[in-house]
Image: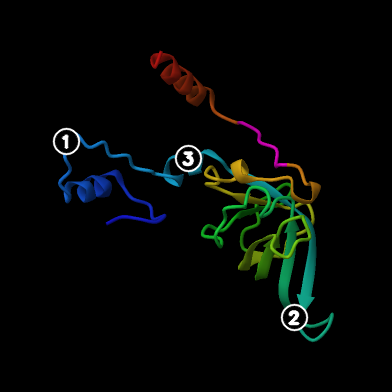
Amino acid sequence: MLSGTEAVSADQLQQTLAEFYFDPALLIIIETERQLVQSAVTLVTSVQSKRVIRQAGTRGPIQEIMYFINDGRYGSFEWWNEIDKHPAVFRTNETVSAAPTHPSSLWGPSCDSADIVCERLELPELEIGDFLVFPDMGAYGVTLASCFNGFPIPKTIVCARLETTRALVDDLGSDG
């Protein structure tokens, strides 16, 4: 039996359904949830501030870096369960690649203790203004956002290649 949030191929779904006998008059509705729409959105956040926590005072080794980003639990991450995909890190003009990493955590902008995006993440040391890019955020993200503490709902910018847009318009037109 399939359940939960695991990714299931069409072949595996077909095989699982074939294991059961269903009355032909029975209508089966399958909720695919994130699988159909998650790849439709890439979320870009920026580092607004950071707090470096060092062992043994201010000169010791870095214990953790807390990054505060411009989106959080009350915005696009409301549905987020601990990070399952690491964000890509971009500096203003280049991608960070082989930089040393530090234990890090990502926090939303609200100053609420529950506004934590993820903990125990290894990231290079980021600067204010650097970007974190989260792929596959098309399901449940901004649709569940609120204006908690007066923060606006994150802005959505629609980007699609001309071919994609034409295919969508053509498909809509064929339905009548």
Disc ID at residue 61? 2
> Which residue is found at the position 56% from the left and 29% from the top?
160
Q: CA distance from mark 2 to mark 3?
A: 42 Å
> Which residue is found at the position 56% from the left and 62% from the top?
82
Residue identifier under label 3: 37
Residue that sits furthest to the bottom in the current view: 56
Judge whether residue 129 is colored magenta.
Answer: no
> Which residue is found at the position 70% from the left and 60% from the top?
115
Q: Position of residue 96 (x, y in %)?
A: 65, 56
Residue identifier under label 1: 24
Q: Nearer the viewer, mark 1 or mark 3?
A: 1
Question: Element under label 2?
Answer: loop
Q: Nearer the viewer, mark 2 or mark 3?
A: 3
Question: Element under label 3?
Answer: helix
Give the magenta part as a residue range. Answer: 153-158
Q: Quadrant of residue 119?
A: bottom right
Magenta stretch, main secondary structure, is loop
